[in-house]
Image (tube, grey):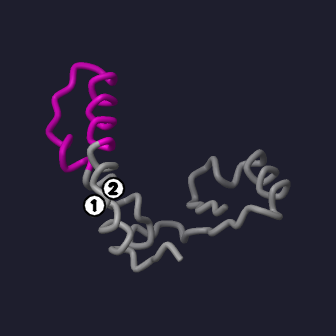
Amino acid sequence: MALVRDNVRLHPAVGTREFIEANAEWLTVFQLPTYAQDLNPQEGIWSLVKRDIGNLAAADLGRITQAVERRLKQIRYRPDLVDGCLSGTGLTLA
């Protein structure tokens, strides 16, 4: 199992470090540089989501949440989009 970490404040927190240390025998941790959009496939996914909801005029947070969930579900059924986001990083699932 792998954990890919960026520098979100939660990741270096004490609880996270303790979890990693306690599970070191089966958990491999990869630390991303401070900001590496080109190495982070999720940036491509969020770009696809934001492209569709960028002009959304929502009355409340619930509507925005629904729009994001709907778009993520659509992307989930398009493996070519997901593969494109991964291949754009130059990384592989090896």
* Location of the N terminus (image quadrant): bottom right
Q: What is the spatial separation of the Cα atoms under label 1 and label 2, in whole angstroms?
A: 8 Å
Residue 81's label in the rendered image is 1
Density class for disc 1 (Cα within 10 Å; few <14, some 14-19, many ≥20) is: some
x then y, percent, for residue 55: 14, 39
Looking at the image, is 86 positioned above or below residue 43? below
x then y, percent, for residue 23: 81, 56
Q: Nearer the viewer, residue 55 or 81?
A: 81
Q: Amino acid at mark 1?
A: Leu
Residue at the (27%, 63%) spot, across then down: 80
x then y, percent, for residue 50: 25, 47
26 with respect to 2 (left or right): right
Q: Report the magenta residues as a range.
A: 49-73
Density class for disc 2 (Cα within 10 Å; few <14, some 14-19, many ≥20) is: many
Residue at the (77%, 62%) spot, across then down: 26
Residue at the (37%, 59%) spot, across then down: 43
From the viewer's perspective, is the residue at label 1 or at label 2 nearer?
1
SS for callout 1: helix
Q: Is residue 51 magenta?
A: yes
Residue 57, by quadrant, is: top left
Q: Main secondary structure of the magenta part?
A: helix
Q: Amino acid at mark 2?
A: Ile
Residue at image mark 2: 45
SS for callout 2: helix
Looking at the image, is 38 positioned above or below residue 81? below
Q: Is residue 84 magenta?
A: no
Residue at the (78%, 48%) spot, across then down: 14
